[in-house]
Image: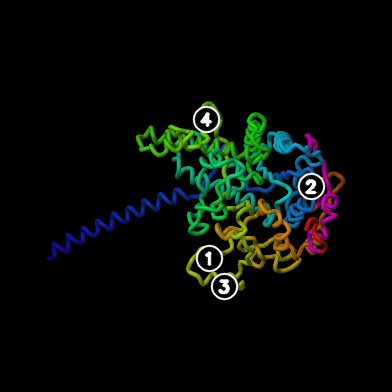
Amino acid sequence: MSIAVSAFSRRQATRYGLLAAVFFIATFLILQLYAPLSFNSDYNYNPSSSTKNLHIAVFATSSNYHLCQLQLSAGLLGYPAPILLNYGADEDKDEMKQHLAKIEGAIQYLDSLPASQQDDLVFMLDGFDIWFQLPHSYIVKRYYDVVKRSHQRHISTFGEALVKKHNIRNTVIFGPDKSCAPAGNDHSSCWAIPESWMEPLSFGPDTDHGRAMHNRPRWLNSGTVMGPARELKDVFERALEQNKHRHVTDSDQFYFSHVFGLQSYARRVHKFEDDRARGCDVAADQEFLLPADVDAKKKDIPKIKGERTEYHIGLDWSSDIFQTAGFYADYLTWIRHNSTSLYVQETAKEGNYHHHFSLPTDLIGNGPEPLSDAVDPALADWRNLPLATNTASRTVPPVIHINGKKGYRHLWWPRNWFYPYIEKMLESKRNTLSWDDELPKDMPALAGAWTFNNGQTDWVGFNETCGRWEDALMGKARPPGN
């Protein structure tokens, strides 16, 4: 009996030992996959989380109420003065020429930066349907979070050797869209691109099956983009080339999406060829990427031989930086993330974590203003303030982009956490504004904006661009067009 027990104990010990070994190995691999990354030889530039190296470039040929929504939010949140690209330029009636001018103006600005700033981060955005919710330090921090997460995904998808061989990385980050437009579904910018990294049922049981509102954001939106200056320039130059030589539509988004589709297709082909060389079963991939009957498949198959295809483009799939409004109206809400909020109390009772929203960790313990300077004690803690929250990804985005239904620019403006405090915050912050005759380069957004047109830089004061709409912005007058 003792011998049998002893044998059983040995078998049991062996089994537990094997289980422990498997658990250890699995844990080790997971930790390696999700370990914090250091930016080393895989990257061509030396990233810095300092906001001093951030350029905010806004596409705006003139000022209006909606540009001032952006400028005012930037001023209240302590942003540096933005650069208004093509400001003062005459808008051509030909929409094709308008989009060409937009891309060419961006390239001129990026070209104007000295060699010492070519690795600086540049955030480019449309001027008439965007405003800020969080300070720019969160934009920079979240950008690097997205870059790191993308790198981890690439290692998991392609393998480290393939990532290094083809220099695969996502460092030019565009905003996400829930529909593929304006290209048709047969275009590579619609079908060849990566799947979203949001959860498969983020928008309920109909996720990715049917209406655009239930799609996970997977497609490129050109209204916001951020990356190192030299890499942004490469992307804009390729989009300009497409616009000039293969003109299809007047939308600049089509041409940026084309570059993204080309890159995505090439990455898939690289993996397909690597898998085939290793003897893997690639029949399904071959039919998807290289169908024998292209016409029957109704696919636009990019020509990648002899072409540069890697432009380091990626998307902010879960809206950690850029929140687009198109097809998202049912999944955005303004939440006070504190324990006294009835909404938080009720959702906390539910066992389903999809229904419970907690403040992102990078917002815990601080607020838009330190308590010593706050015009109201509530401003010292983000938990006290109603923050636009993506209920599908459970993120609080720094940037709100009202694409789609433009009426939300009026409807949602009073929902901003700063809206009740605009007048007091303006008075407080303006009392700290001072400079000599020569304007410093780090002027605050509340003072005004730099302008860039045809290679020339100038300055325009906040009162000149936005003074006439100040009362409307704080609710003392009716906004134009409302």
Residue 45 makes an appearance in the image: yes
Q: Which residues are magenta?
A: 447-475
Residue 401 makes an appearance in the image: no
Q: Residues within 10 Å of mark 2 (few under 14, many from 20)?
A: many
Give x and y (percent) for residue 12. 23, 60
The amino acid type, in three-letter code, at marker 1 is His
Identify the residue position indicated by label 2 in the image: 449
Quarter of the figure with residue 172: top right
Label ID, residue 355: 1
Between discs 3 and 1, the one toward the N terminus: 3
290 up-or-down from 15: above or below = above
Q: Which one is in front, 392 or 186?
A: 186
Between discs 3 and 4, the one toward the N terminus: 4
Which residue is farthest front? 296
Identify the residue position indicated by label 4 in the image: 304
Which residue is farthest right? 437
The amino acid type, in three-letter code, at marker 4 is Ile
145 up-or-down from 42: above or below = below
Cα–Cα span, label 4 and label 1: 45 Å
Identify the residue position indicated by label 3 in the image: 345
The amino acid type, in three-letter code, at marker 3 is Gln
Secondary structure state at the residue bearing disc 2: strand
Between discs 3 and 2, the one toward the N terminus: 3
Tag 3 near tag 2, CB within 8 Å: no
Tag 3 near tag 1, CB within 8 Å: no
Give x and y (percent) for residue 292. 43, 32
The amino acid type, in three-letter code, at marker 2 is Ala
Q: Is residue 156 left or right of residue 328?
A: left
Cα–Cα span, label 3 and label 4: 54 Å
- Does residue 459 show up magenta in the picture? yes
Q: Residues within 10 Å of mark 3 (few under 14, many from 20)?
A: some
Point out the image quarter for the C terminus.
bottom right
